[in-house]
């Protein structure tokens, strides 16, 4: 039962969250605070550092993969034949190289996993305690619309204030917002046209608008760079090419930042497709460019878990570090080795649905299949469609208790936390000029919840504690 002191803390923190712009819209249009936790996530410093040290080589990997057109086409074209959305994205690609510069703003998401007997370590019993030997498992790498740099920076500041008032444990410094806007500013300066703007590609009914507007505001305050918000349909209507430059509302667009375009819902009509083509045909620096967006597809993540494929892009030492973090992934049409011998992946999944997540080639929350939903879906998937789905071993994340604040209500739940590392990488003609880890995002959710979207209502924003 909550004490009066706890009730006052929760009430006051909710109001401070609103004051600091930690906000979202509910589906009915009502304004409320974004879900957040009042229990910072504890982990050993060694695990935290191990995760952060992976960011720079993962950034470099994605730059290399995004520029290898033959590799992307080889793996994605067969899926595009049965996936209209992927087919449309490939069709958007310009045959000419119009952008010499690449800016990657990515987020690499991990769970700290349970150690299974005879799986990751021999003769080790499962534990719920996070130790220096705990296993990192990559969930996914987001190359498009890597969200929450503004909201998580603001939550860190709020948690830090509460620590200074002896109301929370000390939290680990975190400021991805500055890293992102500084990278944007550097790219705009590199583009070299005065009074140019940044185009933010948005969804028409954006629920996470405050994370975007907060970033835009910080960009103006710190670097005096203006932004324009448009849907893809509006870009087709209001944009044009002028000597190779993208011009929108009379302003040259130095950089185009995609916070939309990763779901079929963002292409409600032909004009949206033409809007994306217009961007591709220009010299604007895209975050991400089409090659980078395609590199984030689940199929690419799956093939990169293979040692022989990874060897084409990274050193043997980096490959070993990456492979330690990868969960088992297969397409449904594969023949796989199991404790019961060689079987088709789809047959194995039918008998072990609770041990896997089934993923289509989609970004954004709410697209994956779990448990009984997998069993319902498998019989409906045609044989030629099996290659479009990725089955990924379900990661057994370590549980912990957390005080979750959602829509003004507080509840202590048994939770798991997904930790993302923001990465920023700038390259010219494939040569990397700047490459850094830019901070973290923690999303904490009830253990029995599968999806992890904050603005979709599945998870709470959080910070990290556990070491000085």
Image (cartoon, grey):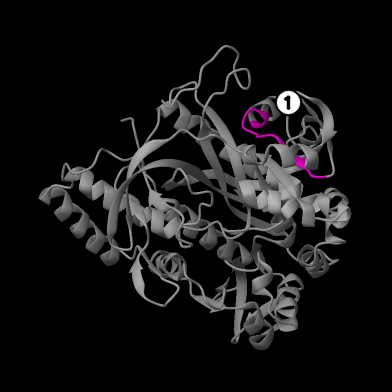
Q: Is residue 323 above or below residue 95?
A: above
Q: Quadrant of the N terminus?
A: top left
Q: Which portion, as a residue range, is magenta?
A: 322-332
Horizontal side, residue 432 vs residue 115: left or right: right
Seen from the viewer's position, the closer of residues 390 and 235 is 390
Where disc 1 sits, the SS reads: helix
Percent across and percent down for residue 232 are: 65, 77
Q: Residue at x 49, y 43 (%)?
A: 418
Q: For residue 323: magenta? A: yes
Seen from the viewer's position, the closer of residues 441 and 459 is 459
Q: Is residue 399 above or below residue 36?
A: above
Horizontal side, residue 201 vs residue 379: left or right: left
Q: For residue 466: magenta? A: no
The answer to whether residue 370 is visible is no
Q: Residue at x 75, y 82 (%)?
A: 270
Horizontal side, residue 456 vs residue 9: left or right: right
Q: Residue at x 30, y 50 (%)?
A: 411
Q: Is residue 183 above or below residue 320?
A: below
Graded by Cα atoms within 10 Å as few (under 14), some (14 to 19) or many (20 or more), the crowding at tag 1 reads few
Which residue in the structure is indicated by mark 1?
316
Percent across and percent down for residue 41 are: 37, 39
């Amino acid at each position: 039962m909550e004490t009066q002191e706890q009730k006052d803390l929760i009430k006051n923190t909710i109001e401070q969250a609103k004051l600091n712009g930690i906000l979202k819209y509910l589906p009915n249009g009502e304004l409320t605070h974004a879900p957040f936790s009042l229990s910072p996530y504890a982990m050993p410093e060694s695990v935290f550092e191990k995760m952060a040290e992976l960011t720079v080589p993962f950034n470099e990997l994605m730059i290399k993969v995004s520029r290898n057109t033959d590799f992307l086409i080889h793996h994605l074209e067969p899926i595009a034949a049965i996936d209209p959305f992927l087919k449309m994205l490939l069709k958007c690609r310009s045959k000419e190289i119009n952008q010499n510069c690449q800016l990657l703003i990515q987020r690499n998401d991990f769970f700290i996993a349970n150690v299974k007997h005879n799986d990751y370590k021999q003769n080790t019993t499962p534990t719920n305690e996070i130790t220096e030997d705990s296993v990192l498992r990559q969930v996914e790498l987001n190359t498009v619309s890597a969200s929450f740099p503004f909201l998580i920076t603001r939550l860190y500041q709020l948690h830090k204030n509460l620590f200074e008032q002896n109301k929370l444990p000390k939290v680990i410094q975190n400021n991805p917002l500055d890293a992102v806007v500084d990278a944007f500013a550097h790219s705009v300066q590199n583009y070299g046209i005065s009074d140019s703007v940044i185009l933010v590609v948005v969804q028409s009914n954006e629920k996470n608008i405050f994370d975007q507007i907060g970033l835009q505001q910080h960009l103006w305050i710190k670097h005096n760079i203006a932004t324009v918000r448009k849907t893809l349909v509006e870009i087709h209507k209001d944009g044009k090419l002028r000597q190779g430059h993208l011009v929108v509302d009379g302003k040259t667009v130095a950089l185009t930042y995609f916070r939309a375009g990763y779901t079929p819902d963002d292409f409600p009509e032909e004009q949206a497709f033409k809007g994306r083509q217009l961007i591709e045909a220009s010299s604007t620096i895209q975050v991400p460019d089409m090659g980078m967006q395609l590199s984030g597809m689940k199929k690419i993540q799956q093939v990169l878990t293979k040692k022989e494929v990874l060897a084409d892009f990274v050193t043997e030492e980096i490959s070993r570090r990456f492979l330690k973090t990868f969960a088992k992934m297969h397409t449904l049409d594969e023949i796989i080795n199991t404790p019961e011998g060689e079987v088709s992946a789809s047959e194995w999944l039918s008998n072990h649905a609770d041990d896997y997540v089934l993923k289509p080639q989609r970004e954004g929350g709410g697209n994956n299949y779990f448990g009984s939903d997998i069993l319902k879906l498998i019989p409906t998937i045609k044989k030629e469609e099996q290659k479009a789905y990725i089955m990924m071993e379900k990661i057994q994340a370590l549980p912990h208790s957390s005080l979750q604040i959602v829509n003004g209500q507080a509840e202590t739940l048994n939770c798991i936390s997904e930790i993302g590392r923001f990465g920023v990488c700038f390259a010219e003609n494939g040569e990397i000029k700047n490459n850094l880890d830019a901070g973290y995002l923690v999303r904490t959710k009830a253990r029995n919840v599968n999806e992890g979207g904050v603005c979709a209502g599945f998870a709470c924003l959080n910070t990290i504690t556990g070491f000085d």
